[in-house]
Structures are given as C-alpha cells and as structure tokens.
Image (tube, coloured by chain):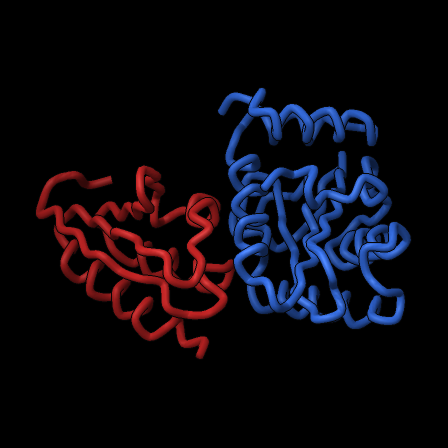
Amino acid sequence: MPTTGESISSEVTIKNRLGLHARPAMSFVDIANTFVSQVLVKKGDQTVDGKSIMQMMMLAATQGTQLQIVAQGPDAPQAIQALRALIDRKFDEE
Amino acid sequence: MKLQDFVVEKAIVAQLKGVDRDTVIRELVDALIEAGAAPRAIKDELIKLILDREKHGSTGFGKGVAVPHVKHDKIKGMAAAIGCSAAGVDFNALDKAPVYSVFLLLSPKNKPDDHLHAMENIFSNLQKDTFRRFLRQAATVEAVLDLIQDADSQQIQG
C-alpha cells in the first residue's frame, strides 16, 4: 500500500436513512479500491480500512453519523472527491 | 448490543445439511421460523428476498463467512440464525473461497439503526481470526453457544 504522496482528509455525514448498510458500504469499498491511495475511515476513535467491506461494516454508521475519510497516496485528492460524492448523493438510495 | 441479544439459540444449526447457498438459506430461515422468530406466512417471501439480495451482490464478504440478511415489516425484533458447514458452501463469495460459517439476520424494516448495530457486532467478531476459527470448528450447538458467550464477554482476542 503506497504511503508516499499527499495525505488529505475530509469530514462527511451519512445522510441516507438506512445508514451505511451492506450495499452502500460495498459501493464505498468498490470505489475506494479503484484508487492506489490508502483509504482510512474514522468514526471517533475508531479507524477502519476503507477498502475492506468487513471493516466498514464495523462502523455502524447510522444516519447522521460523522465520519472522516483519510486518503494517502498519489491519487488521494481524486479518491476523497469520489467517495465524498458517493456519500453526498446518499449512495443513490433516496 | 451483544450477539446473545439477537442470536436465536434454537436457530443455531451446527451441522448444516444444505450443500449450496440456496439450500443453506432455506435451512436457516426454516430454523428461525420454527423458533418463532418470524411468521410462517412470510417464509417463502423471506427466502426469495434474501436470495434476490445475494444475486444482487454476495454477502460472502470473504474469509469463509457470509451474512445473508433481509429487512421486513413483519419482523418484530432482530433475529439471527447461525449455520456451520464443515464441508464449506459456495456462496459466490468475494474471494471465491467456500463459506463455512453463515450468520443469517432478519431485521425489522423500521429500525435501520438496530440493523447496523447488529451487523457491527457480527463483523467485529467475524473480523477476529480466533472467532472465525472456533466457529468453523464448532460441531455442536453447545460449542457455538459457548463461543458467542465468550465473544459477548470480550474473552476472544483478535
């Protein structure tokens, strides 16, 4: 996993009613895996790998939950932008 | 939330008879209905919804485990079945590996947050190598019950 390059982060809020359940979590992981940058997702003190579906399911990110996405690597800005967009459009659920 | 809050003891199937995804899902839904966790009238509908969900995207997320699930407005409280297959079952898992342990979760439709907390609990445990190994080795209902009691009391290390 590349650790060189820019590290950037972005605060997001889960807006869809059902929260980050399996299908949206899978969409997140699928998009995260299209980037070479490392993607971490933080909820309070908890940090999980944004490229692992099993770890993402451990967030229990209900509607209204604030998360921080941290990307590090050569395509970190693009990764943040794509993942933010997915969350902002409520995973195309509503 | 603890595993014991929603795992239905009578729906623990330590030695699954089913040999493929569809028969295992039927077997576990049957067990939940026999245990009274869901009305018998919606059995076929539940099975169809769960299978449709699997076809849309496998809940075999890798490492030999699968978590098929469904939300339904006739389900009053969260209820999970646990099934173990020594031989392994093809769940079309993300890593293409056989599935040895299945958590099948029924959730009420109007409580999405409870569903997420149950999933969090299931995956926090399935993430641990020790938990997965013990569950895979469990051949009796008692062994599965001991495991989830230990897991709930935080006695299982990563």
Residue B75 position, x and y percent, is: 74, 64
Relative to B95, is B52 above or below? below
Relative to B143, is B7 above or below? below
Residue A80 position, x and y percent, is: 21, 59
| Viewer-closest of B108 and B53 | B108
> Residue at (45%, 75%) from the top-left corner?
A93
| Viewer-closest of A20 and A62 | A62
Compared across the picture, whether B57 is left or right of A52 comes to right
Relative to A2, is B131 above or below? above
* Quadrant in the picture for residue A20: bottom left
Residue B156 position, x and y percent, is: 57, 22
| Viewer-closest of B89 and B16 | B16
Query: Which color has been applied to chain A in this rendered view?
Result: red
> Residue at (35%, 42%) from the top-left corner?
A48
Q: Quadrant of the N terminus of chain B?
A: top right
* Quadrant in the picture for residue B52: bottom right
Q: Which chain is blue?
A: B
| Viewer-closest of B1 and A11 | B1
